[in-house]
Each structure stands twice: as structure tokens, then as C-alpha cells.
Amino acid sequence: LVVGLLSSSGLPILPAIFLVVGLGTVIGIVNGIVVSKIGVNAFIATLGTGTIVVGLNYAYSGGIPLQLTQSREFTNIAIGRIAGVPHLVIIMAVVLALLWVILNRTVQGQHIKAIGVSPESARRAGVAVDRSRIVAFAIASTCAAIGGVLMASNLGSGQVTAGDSFMLTSFSAAFLGSAALREGQFHILGTLIGVLTVAVGNNGLAMIGAPIFTQFLFTGCLLVVAVALGGIGRRYARG
């Protein structure tokens, strides 16, 4: 969408980015309402909402990649550097810092973590469970939209299927992170460790010339190991 807005609608870069990220937030809110107010299972609701969005993407693009025209400034968002540090690393650090502050230094973040432990206990303690769930989905969807914008900037085009391969990778990184530092709990620093582990592993396989299927084997095995370690960690914590 951001590529289409820049190329076809002629919007300046910042308004186009804010519009797309804002739309991502709205999608997260809708997803949160479906889960919280209608009672649909979170995984199924997210899968369904995501499939609808993919369909809308195909309708918007006609199923073909959208090419950027005269927008070097947009591609520079991903490939540029400040004092030798890539923009993507800086953006990642800012997002991680904001998420850490939200989860660990705000009332809303404490509510979200309490719901993750026990929604019913949180409700009895006076937490607005439905509202907090919607906020959590909105934050996640906003981050996904930011990721999409950065991917489009890095590729220099808008491709509907560009993010498909990251689904399993994201699961692996998150679950691997839940096994790091804290026993079976999802947290910001652990997720960063998981992301770096998966990225370094896949890049290493690519650099040594390993066949592409080995990356899928590595990611799949890592997911199984991460989930198993998470379960072991939770049992250890209870013991």
C-alpha cells in the first residue's frame, strides 16, 4: 500500500507512511474486537483477519509487484546509514525500547502481562481485560505495518508475498526468546535474542552456500526446540 500511495497517488513519503501504519493499527483494533467482544479464538481470528488483508492486497495490486518511481528517499529509509549504523538497526532499537517501556513501565503494560498469566485473575483484580487485549493487538499490528513499510523500502517495490516466509521465522524467534533469560515467558530482550539467533543462522547457511531447503529445516527444528525449552522452563519454574 505504501508503494502504491507513493507511485500512483503521489503522496509525500511521511503522509503515506503514517497512513499505512495508521491503517495497520486499525486492523489490529478490529482483530482485537473480534477476539475480545465476539469471543473468537485469538489464533483463528488473527489467521482470518490476516487472510482478509492478503485478499485486499491482491485486489489493490492486481497480484503483481508495484514498482517505486522516483523515490530514492523512500528506499534510503532501509538502506541508509547514520554514522555507519544502518537505519534499520536504529529503527529496531527505538521500537524495542518503546515496547520495553510500554510493557515494563506503564500500567497498561502490566495489565497486558497480567492477562497473559491469567485473564480471569486479571479480571477479578479490576483489569479491563477486553480493552487491554485490543490495545495489545493494536500494538502488534502497528509493528507489523512498520515492518511492511521497511520491507517495501528495502526491496524498492511492493510485493504481496514478500512477508510470507517470515511467519514461521517469527514464531521460532518468539518462542526461542521465551526460553531465554526467563523461564517460558515472552519478553522483549528474549525476543531480540531469538530474532538474532534465527537471522544469524539463516544468513550463515546462505553464506556457506547451503541449499535453500536447509534454512527451512533449521527454522522448523529451531521452533520445535524453542517450544520444548519453553515447556521445560515453565515446569522448572513451577517446581
Image: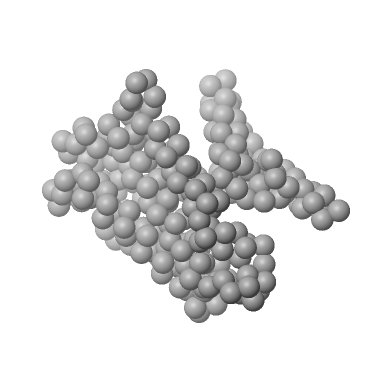
Residue furthest to the left: 10
- Which of the 4 image quarters holds residue 81? top left
In the depicted structure, whether residue 139 falls above or below residue 125: above
x and y percentages locating residue 216 in the rendered image: 59, 39
x and y percentages locating residue 135 in the rendered image: 46, 63
Does residue 81 appear in the picture of this structure? Answer: yes
As rendered, which of 229 and 104 lies closer to the eye?
A: 104
As rendered, which of 181 and 11 lies closer to the eye?
A: 181
Q: How is the image coloured?
A: one colour
Q: Residue at x 55, y 51 (%)?
A: 104
x and y percentages locating residue 118 in the rendered image: 67, 67
In the depicted structure, whether residue 211 falls above or below residue 173: above
Q: Residue at x 46, y 55 (%)?
A: 140
Q: Residue at x 77, y 48 (%)?
A: 233
Q: Residue at x 13, y 48 (%)?
A: 10
How many numbered dots are placed on residues in this image? 0
- Which of the 4 image quarters holds residue 125? bottom right
Q: Relative to residue 237, is residue 44 drawn left or right? A: left
Does residue 168 appear in the picture of this structure? Answer: no
As rendered, which of 233 and 109 lies closer to the eye?
A: 109
Q: Relative to residue 176, is residue 147 drawn left or right? A: left
x and y percentages locating residue 68 in the rendered image: 22, 40
Q: Relative to residue 76, is residue 51 drawn left or right? A: right
In the depicted structure, whether residue 144 falls above or below residue 190: below
Residue furthest to the bottom: 38
